[in-house]
């Protein structure tokens, strides 16, 4: 009985470590994508505003288009990722979410829903020094 209990505990800890590793890996991938998207969006400076008033602001529509284009052309992109792009003249924010299914823990936690990994990145336009 003791060995059986030990085997179940090892299976549970192994499943927990595998699922946590998958979540951390997924978060790292999504964070890289979100960072790249906000940097791409932050390059959409409103040139007319800069030339006329010397104020660095984003063109929100162009910023959203550049961020979306970056995400769609990213090699890790797929339809299971939910994106939210919020551009304003002052900054751009990108939030990415994806559900990650349990692997080994699915055996022990029958009926459990997948968990959601979410990341958010912000960027503001600025002049290079």
Image (tube, rainbow, N blue to C red):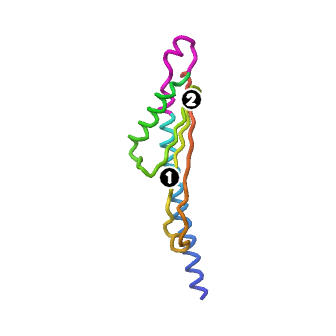
Q: Which residue is mark 2?
A: 88
- Judged left or right of residue 71, residue 11 is right
Residue 81 bears which disc, if any?
Answer: none
Q: Which residue is mark 1?
A: 98
- Confirm whether the magenta stretch covers residue 44: yes
Q: Which residues are magenta?
A: 39-56
Circle 1: is it few (<14), some (14-19), or many (20+) Cα within 10 Å?
many
Q: CA distance from mark 2 to mark 1?
A: 25 Å
Location of residue 80 in the rendering, given as x and y in whole percent from the top left corner = 44, 52
- Judged left or right of residue 71, residue 21 is right
Q: Earlier in the sequence, mark 2 or mark 1?
A: 2
Vertically, is 45 above or below 32? Answer: above
Q: Residue 72 is drawn in which quadrant?
A: top left
Residues tagged 2 and 1 counted as in contact (Cβ below 8 A): no
Location of residue 114 in the rendering, given as x and y in whole percent from the top left corner = 53, 61
- Confirm whether the magenta stretch covers residue 60: no
Q: The N terminus appears in which quarter of the rendering?
A: bottom right
- Label 1, secondary structure: give it: strand
* Residue at the (51%, 74%) spot, across then down: 107
Location of residue 68 in the rendering, given as x and y in whole percent from the top left corner = 44, 37
* Residue at the (57%, 70%) spot, across then down: 13
Give the prevailing secondary structure in the magenta stretch: helix
- Label 2, secondary structure: give it: loop
């Amino acid at each position: 009985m003791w060995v059986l209990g030990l085997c179940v505990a090892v299976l549970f800890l192994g499943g927990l470590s595998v699922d946590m590793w998958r979540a951390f890996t997924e978060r790292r991938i999504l964070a890289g994508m979100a960072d790249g998207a906000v940097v791409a969006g932050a390059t959409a400076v409103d040139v007319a505003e800069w030339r006329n008033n010397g104020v660095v602001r984003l063109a929100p529509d162009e910023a959203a288009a550049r961020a979306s284009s970056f995400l769609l052309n990213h090699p890790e992109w797929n339809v299971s990722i939910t994106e939210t792009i919020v551009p304003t003249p002052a900054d751009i924010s990108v939030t990415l979410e994806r559900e990650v299914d349990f692997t080994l823990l699915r055996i022990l936690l029958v009926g459990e829903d997948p968990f959601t990994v979410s990341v958010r990145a912000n960027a503001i336009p600025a002049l290079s020094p």
